[in-house]
Image (spheres, grey):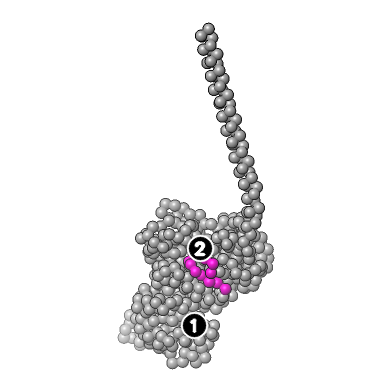
Amino acid sequence: MRQWVSRVERGRWVTSRRLHRSFSNNFSILAMRLSLALVAVCIVFSVPEAGAYSPPKAALVIDANSGKTLHASNARAPRYPASLTKVMTLYVLFEYLRDGRLEMDTRLTVSAHAAKRPPSKVGFRPGDSLTVRAAIRLLVTKSANDVAAVVAENIAGSESAFAQLMTRKAREMGMKDTTFRNASGLPHSEQKTTAYDMSILARRVLTDFPEYADYFKTRYAKYRGKTYRNHNRLLFRYKGIQGLKTGFIRASGFNVMLAAKRGGKRLIAVIMGGRSAGARDARARRLLDAAWKNASVRAPEMAAHLPRRNPVFRPSEREQQIRHKLASADGSPAALLFKHLQASAPAPRDEVRPAPRRKIQARLIAKRTPEPETRTQEASTPEPERARGSATSEGLAGPYHVQVGAYVSANDARRRLEAVSAQAGGLLDGHPHQAIQAEVNGREVFRARFGGFDKAQAWRSCDKLKQRSVDCLVMAAR
């Protein structure tokens, strides 16, 4: 009897355990179904919210060869630039490289402020450093906000001072509706621009600094064991894209600044206010596709004023032998005549150095020193240039010069000086001029300068030259 009762109780216990398991399983399934239902509800109710996100749009496509507008939509309406800002940060950095105040291997120090910048960022710590070359590549690919702050602080002392410099540079370019408050494009209510102004910036950075233009096409950048992929997906997916930059903050939507080239046709496109990166890219594709048929194949008009480098003339072996014999026969009449011709004639064309591996195109320097403290620093810190004989700024009266160009050829610099003298209409009468030879980053340049100014005269003269459409730069004599 007891064994039977025991079996019954054991059976009840087993049945109870089975029922408990079944209930638990059913409850788990029910809970899972409820969770999925809640997720589905959230998705359903979130779709209208995502669809409601509609940042203000703007678009502009121009023919980079002629400057003609091929498409415009709200092109002059105020918009937030987001990380398109970094193209101006790079423009100023390129200026410092061109003028010899920085070199590609110069190390930039990371401050606590820079290290605290929010993403996108590399993740530097205060006291770290990186080269200018690495900074350029990380700005283009990673769009690193901490790197933008590093560049700003190492050039201007603070990011706010650098933003003022950027804004002044924008005004010089004709970007009348652009104001910068930081170097990265992080949200700031006063940091505004237009698609039109961004197109000016894109065109200028490619025209003024052709030797650095390839950086904007960088697809991947390796740094400290990591590989960063460029955010500009059209670099990988659209034929002819030459770079430049993407950007996004919530207030701006998805922005992109593009340069594209097919054959002799060149386009600049600025798309702002995309609801997503995909929507932005799709619109850019449509606008570019429609613009090619109307694009011209002429040389860029902005570069039309740039002097062409004289072709390198190389004397034959026979001519070199004759020159050597004439130069070594010190007492002969022929030698005396040869030396006289050498002393009185301009440098022969065969002494022109061949173009370096990457062509340096002559370009006008249109840089006004940004701030009083920066001007003081320029006046007290010598430029990293190597003087050669009489072709130095010491041979030109000071204490201040007005520079109207920098060229790869002395003859080009002299021609520019003569042209500006004629264009100035007596403004520069009494001021001597000279093509000053210097070496910047291992490259020979000739700076076209007028001398004999005090500081106030130099600035007044430069302002008046700009009114006559002559770009100029005030420099302290060395």
Indicate the quadrant where residue 440 lies.
bottom left
Return the residue nearer the eye: 413 or 33. 33
Bin the neighbour count of mark 2 within 10 Å (Cα to Cα): few under 14, some 14-19, many 20 and up. many
Residue 163 screen position, x and y as percent = 47, 70
Direction from residue 442 to residue 310 in the image, left or right: right
Residue at the image point whose x is 59% and y is 75% from the top: 301
Give the residue at mark 2: 186
Q: Which of the two marks, 1 or 2, is nearer to us in this view?
A: 2
Assess disc 1: are there few (<14), some (14-19) or many (≥20) residues with their C-alpha within 10 Å of its C-alpha.
Answer: many
| Residue 449 among magenta residues | no
Q: Residue at x 53, y 11 (%)?
A: 5
* 3D distance between C-alphas at marks 1 and 2: 41 Å
Tell me the tag on residue 38. Answer: none
User: Which secondary structure class fits the magenta region best?
Assistant: loop
In the rendered structure, find residue 416 and report the number of the disc placed on it. Answer: 1
What range is drawn magenta here? 177-190
Task: Give the amino acid at mark 1.
Answer: Arg
Residue 193, given in percent of the width and then of the height, sits at 57, 69
Q: Quadrant of residue 153?
A: bottom left
Res 51 visible: yes
x 49%, y 57%: residue? 120
Q: Residue furthest left?
A: 331
- Name above or below for residue 333 compared with residue 57: below
Q: Position of residue 294 (x, y in %)?
A: 68, 68
